[in-house]
Amino acid sequence: MAIRYSSLMQRLAFMLVLACALVPAQTLKVDTFMLPNGMKVLVNEDHDIPSVALYFFYKIGARNERPGTTGLSHFFEHMMFNGAKQFGPKQFDIQMEKNGGSNNAYTSRDVTVYQDWFPPPALELMFKMEADRIRDLSFDPKMIESERGVVYSERRTSVDNNPWGALFEQLEAVSFVAHPYHFPVLGWPSDIESWTMDDLQAHFKMGYAPNNCVMVISGDVTLEQIKELTAKYLAPIPQHDPPPPVRTKEPEQLGERRLEVHRPAALPIVLVAFHIPQSSSPDDKVITVLDDVLTAGRSSRLYRRLVDQDQLVLQVGGNADNSLDPYLYVFYMQLRTGVDPKKAEAALYDELAKVVKDGVTAGELTKSRNSITANLYRQLATINGKANTLGSYEIFYGDYKKLFTVVDEISKVTSADIQQVAAKYFTAKNRTVATLIPESAAAGGDEQ
């Protein structure tokens, strides 16, 4: 959310907090080492509170799947909690809770990430349990069928019965004609129904090996402890051949693509996607600033134009996820009752054209730099945020150390840079427009 100032004292207070925050972030101590089996380990010692955050980033997601196996990475997000050789079904959660900890996981187009949070006395137990499920995950047919039903149910909730999810899935499928970003992270229904035991075992062996993983730990630990425990529990796990390189590159889009989804919904939704480069691209930081100018909070350009001034939409925003390959910047708009989607689109394109023609103001640049920097340091204020951010930079930017230069890079973004990037990517022929048209209007006016 964009930062708003109401007084000189607020400005001064914010700058003081920001100046203080810069020092620990720039000196954030991270030790790294590589296990003989290829697992990279990042250790951030933080003894402020007696707690630990442990993350495993496996470099496998929807982009590593193929027709017939879509959704398998997400399936293993669930299966990794369903028993292994030493710790049986549900024991991972049970033992974690007995020792005062908690866990979660997430899957994206590029990664599957497992998250553990626990007090320091549970440290060795956590390494023992993680090693058990990496090395000896159970493939019990009954558990597989049970979990197949769980992930199918999640798909029904998140996509089939969700207007936003259904529209976004179709947007990705139309935006990409060649690259595997075409595939939904949750998988196509027919694939979920038909995964075989061979499919599961091959995918697990390929993706969830130590040489395809970055482990990040932040909290009340020492480097010596982590070296000892990784050598004892993780280093003996054999490596496997990693996922084959994704060679397919999405061809340049040569004209606007449009699609409609007709289904029960309260209000129309419009998604407008533009192809942009991967996170490691030099243009990434410029897009980050442009995103903030256009969509961050009530003072953003699109909110002021589409919500306040023209009163066309109830909400408007945008997003560009981290990605290993070129992906999408997506604008989203939920329209007010009776508004023609084309009118909302026209207002969006008009604002983008203004950026291309005139750039952004010095005030907008300053606000966005401050907002982005403050958000970054809020992420680094907790051990959980540090573990996730360090791992994300290591995976998507190729080196966690790039985290420590991002503020400087953001500060160098100019209005001319923004004009150039907007003109390069936000073009008519580079966009895909997805519109959800309600089959029946919901009562109650501007409901969400």
Image: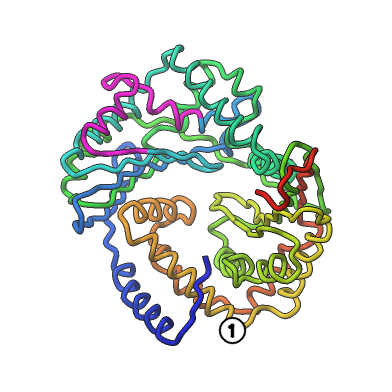
Locate residue 232 relative to residue 79 in the image: left or right: left
Type of the residue with mark 1: Ala
Question: On screen, 376 above or below 23?
Answer: above
Segment tinted magenta in the rendering: 75-103
Q: In the depicted view, which residue is nearer to us: 264 or 445?
A: 445
Give neighbour class at mark 1: few <14, some 14-19, many 20+ (Cα, 10 Å): few
Locate residue 6 relative to residue 121 in the image: left or right: right
Q: In the depicted view, which residue is nearer to us: 339 or 252?
A: 339
Question: On screen, 343 above or below 125?
Answer: below
Q: Quarter of the image holding residue 360?
A: bottom right
Q: Position of residue 283 (x, y in %)?
A: 60, 65
Question: On screen, 338 above or below 89?
Answer: below
**x 48%, y 56%: residue:** 397
For this orientation, the residue located farthest to the bottom is 8
Q: In the depicted view, which residue is nearer to us: 309 or 224?
A: 309
Q: Quarter of the image holding residue 341?
A: bottom right
User: Colour scheme used in the picture?
Assistant: rainbow
Residue tagged 1? 362
**x 83%, y 57%: residue:** 342
Q: Position of residue 164 (x, y in %)?
A: 66, 44
Q: Position of residue 374 (x, y in %)?
A: 43, 69
Q: Position of residue 382 (x, y in %)?
A: 32, 57
**x 30%, y 73%: residue:** 23
What is the secondary structure assignment of the residue under circle 1?
helix
